[in-house]
Image (tube, rainbow, N blue to C red):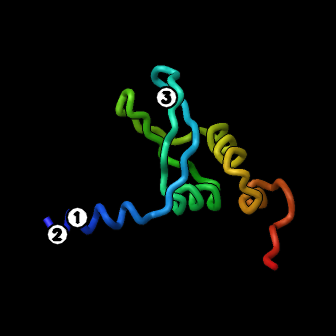
Amino acid sequence: MFILNRRIDQAMNEPTIRFPATCPQCGMEYLGEYPIAEVAAALLRGGRLRLYASCHEYHWSASEREMEQIREYLGAPLFEHQRGFGPRPTRG
């Protein structure tokens, strides 16, 4: 029981971000919630994020278009250089 509660506490402390997505099975739009680290890693490596629609309990890899929409929704200038949209951001 302690281990289960510890995992729940860890999961609750992990920062998440919510963004709209559309179920490819039925077209229903929903608000998905994903760990920020997972989203950032997918954007940085130019990979695909695994999305989930609870209406059909369906998992899929985000398409290139969906990844671009996620990037735009997040207003992620830090990730634009990965797609060739401009200079690498500077820290300062």
**How far apart in space, not on screen, are marks 3 and 1 (Cα)?**
31 Å
Pointer 2 residue: 2
| Helix, strand or loop status at disc 3 | loop
Residue type for callout 1: Asn
Residue reaching furthest to the right: 87
Which disc is residue 23 wearing?
3
Pointer 1 residue: 5
Report if the CB atoms under discs 3 and 1 are less than 8 Å apart. Answer: no
Residue type for callout 2: Phe
Q: Which is nearer the N-term, disc 3 or disc 2?
A: 2
Q: Is 41 located above or below residue 75 in the figure? A: below
Residue 42 screen position, x and y as percent: 58, 56
Q: Which is nearer the N-term, disc 3 or disc 1?
A: 1
Residue type for callout 3: Cys
Report if the CB atoms under discs 2 and 1 are less than 8 Å apart. Answer: yes
**Could you tell whether 33 is left or right of 4 in the image?**
right
**Could you tell whether 51 is left or right of 48 in the image?**
left
Q: Residue at x 28, y 65 (%)?
A: 7
Which image quadrant is residue 84 in? Answer: bottom right
Camera-nearest residue between 74 and 26 = 74
